[in-house]
Image (tube, rainbow, N blue to C red):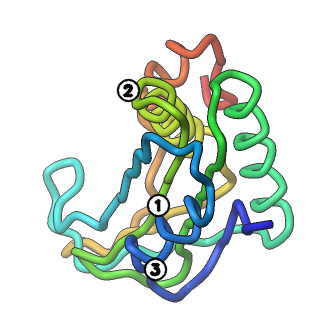
Amino acid sequence: MNTRVSIQTQDFDLSTEVARLREQDKRVGAVCTFIGTVRDRNDGQSISTMELEHYPGMTEKSIEAMVDEAFKRFDIYAARVIHRVGLLQPLDQIVLVAVTSAHRGESFQACEFLMDYLKTQAPFWKKEQTPEGARWVDARVSDDAALAKWGIRSQNA
């Protein structure tokens, strides 16, 4: 069985991950992926680096529960979430969400659901370096609203 959730410092390769996800599964008619990257700006300020921290074990367990929920809600065959931690630069990949299903609708929905869930519920802490110094990134109201459309209330709300 493929690993569904990985928290890692090293980068990932989209082609490799998608190939592993759909390997030998002839039922797959759709693969949806999302990759999040580090921007050079946030809230109008320049960002030189972003550092992500987490609690090993707890973070994986939390994301596994999110993946379980996606399987309950959507008719999907496989899901893969990779989230990087440590010090990252603008343009670096941060997160991958990939989902397979028979048809595109289920894959699109499950991928979006998982990303919305990750943005608000996954236990990560982000610190950005700006010209004014380091700052912790707070949860966004827009992320909570995105989660709410799935009938889930954010822990931050």
| Amino acid type of the residue that numbered disc 1 sits on in the rendered structure | Leu
Circles 3 and 1, Cβ within 8 Å, touching? The answer is yes
Residue at left offset 51%, top offset 88%: 10
What x and y, as percent, mark residue 145? 45, 19
| Amino acid type of the residue that numbered disc 3 sits on in the rendered structure | Phe
**From mark 2 to mark 3, how far is it between C-alphas?**
27 Å
Above/below status of 25 relative to 75:
below
What x and y, as percent, mark residue 74? 63, 25
Q: Is residue 143 visible?
A: yes
| Secondary structure of the residue carrying numbered label 2 | helix
| Mark 3 Cα shell of 10 Å, populated few (<14), some (14-19), many (≥20) | some
Could you tell whether 114 is left or right of 112 in the image?
Answer: right
Say whether disc 1 or disc 2 marks the residue closer to the N-terminus. 1
Query: In the picture, which quadrant includes the C terminus?
Result: top right
Above/below status of 33 relative to 140:
below
Residue at left offset 15%, top offset 67%: 46
**From mark 3 to mark 1, how far is it between C-alphas?**
8 Å
Say whether disc 2 or disc 3 marks the residue closer to the N-terminus. 3
| Secondary structure of the residue carrying numbered label 1 | strand
| Secondary structure of the residue carrying numbered label 3 | loop
| Mark 2 Cα shell of 10 Å, populated few (<14), some (14-19), many (≥20) | few
What x and y, as percent, mark residue 33? 40, 51
Residue sticking out furthest to the front: 26
User: Can you tell which mark lies on residue 96?
Assistant: 1
The residue beneath circle 2 is 142
| Amino acid type of the residue that numbered disc 2 sits on in the rendered structure | Ser
**From mark 1 to mark 2, how far is it between C-alphas?**
20 Å
What x and y, as percent, mark residue 36? 35, 58
Residue sticking out furthest to the bottom: 10
